[in-house]
Image: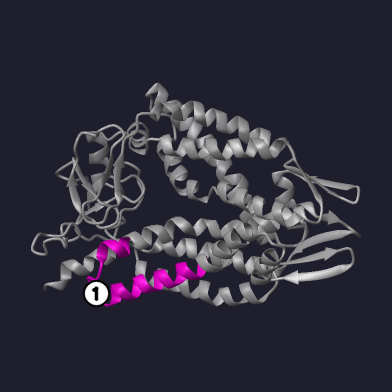
Amino acid sequence: MIADSTAPSMRSLRICRCETCGLTCRRLPKTDQKQHCPRCHTTIHTRKPNALSRTWALITAALILYIPANLFPIMTLTYFGRTESSTIVSGVQSLFKAGMWPIALIVLFASVIVPLLKLIVLSFLLISIHKKTLWRLQDRTRLFRITEAVGRWSMIDIFMITILAALVKFQMLSTIEPEIGASFFAAVVILTIFAAHTFDPRLLWDAGVHHEK
Amino acid sequence: MNHTDQPSLILCPECDQPYKKRPAKIDHIAHCHRCRAVLDHQRADGHHTLPLTITGIILFIIVNLNTFVSLNIAGLEENFRLIDGVYALFEAGMWDLAAVVFLTALFAPAFSLATLFYITLAMQWRKTPPAGRQLLRYLKMMSPWGMLEVFFLGFVAAAVKLADMATLTLDTGFYTFILLVITMSWTYTCFEWNHAWHIMAPLTNQNMTQSKNR
């Protein structure tokens, strides 16, 4: 399953794939100028530039913001005089209490579990690259693929708040207002989306090429 | 910068494994042997993209002109369109959220639909249009940011939350929205990226020499 380490890697031959259009190109030997894809004119890289440091930076930022995102309330509901501020977790709790299990589970999964899982998985993948391990390469690549695909669904909570805030505007009777927790949460989701984008799964497989040396 | 010596070479995007290009079999998915990433997927329904795009544009316009739902509490009624959602966030002072929702629920889908229309039209006529290359690039960058399907689930969550404190009536906008989401997903599935690149940015010897001298 592991590639023959005696065969020259595409990276050493400076052959690479354009990120935007998929064309297989060969970079010229290192020059100061940026090199461009002949088809789509985007800059060509053999590996995503600074993939490890960028992804670590984005993950760290997301982790830091994850705390206020969950501590601060995401919305305030005023219902016939009663005011109730809810955080992400308390929002899920109230859905469960109201007996709406399917939706509660979806929101719990998408807004609480998924962002955390993304951060854990990406950290795990980054550490596995640092350790140059060859453990279950295909599974780790598949793990990354799933992590990348699932990221956008965390936005469910943000859209839910948008709709609630736009609809429930009955001045004296009932209003829903978004709170600062929502901004933090949106930032976390976007940062994790970017983190999955800056990560280069090919680095996982590079460990196999250098391993035998 | 020149094209590789073997123009028929393909690299796996996730593990860099090289493969020789083989004539595509319709409706067969080509997977990388090492990491199971999808390398290529030629579909039989590529020609569906243009009519689907046009349908998508029409539906998008209808969705934005109509209200989604009507909420009724103790006789008072409120309803909203997509833009009202963005505006409500802006009014509440959360302009950053407003910007994000505007991008993911309005701008990105609108831009993608318009660009897709321009590109699929050019593909239909097999002519390289002006700015084709740039537009296809922008489409590639912008399309992951269209999150209408996620918006739909967010809407369902909001509706469920509201159901016990008020009466909810689903309007035209809602049903059209479902159709829009289905249409857009279908469009993206049918769209043939490789063919699009071939038309928008054809590789000629002249191209390649130009890039060498860049």
So how many labels did they put on this image? 1
Q: Residues within 10 Å of mark 1 (few under 14, many from 20)?
A: some
Relative to A172, residue B143 above or below: above
The stretch of residues the image draws in magenta is A115-141
Q: Is residue B131 visible?
A: yes
Image quadrant holding the N terminus of chain A, namely bottom left
Query: Residue drawn at (61%, 56%), measured in percent from left and top?
Result: B100
- Side of A199 where B73 appears, left or right: right
- Going by the numbered disc 1, the residue's amino acid type is Lys
- Side of B98 where B214 appears, left or right: left
Magenta: main secondary structure: helix
Query: Residue drawn at (48%, 75%), measured in percent from left and top?
Result: A60
Task: Say which residue label 1 marks.
Answer: A132
- Side of B10 where B155 appears, left or right: right
| Nearest to the observer: residue A196 or residue A29 | A196
In the picture, residue B27 is in which quadrant? top left
In the picture, residue A10 is in which quadrant? bottom left
Indicate whether residue A75 is drawn in magenta: no
Relative to B12, residue B195 above or below: above
Image quadrant holding the C terminus of chain A, namely bottom left
Relative to B194, residue A109 above or below: below
Query: Residue drawn at (83%, 65%), measured in percent from left and top?
Result: A78
- Relative image position of residue A137 (x, y in whole percent): 25, 65
Q: Chain of mark 1?
A: A
- Relative image position of residue A191 (x, y in whole percent): 51, 65
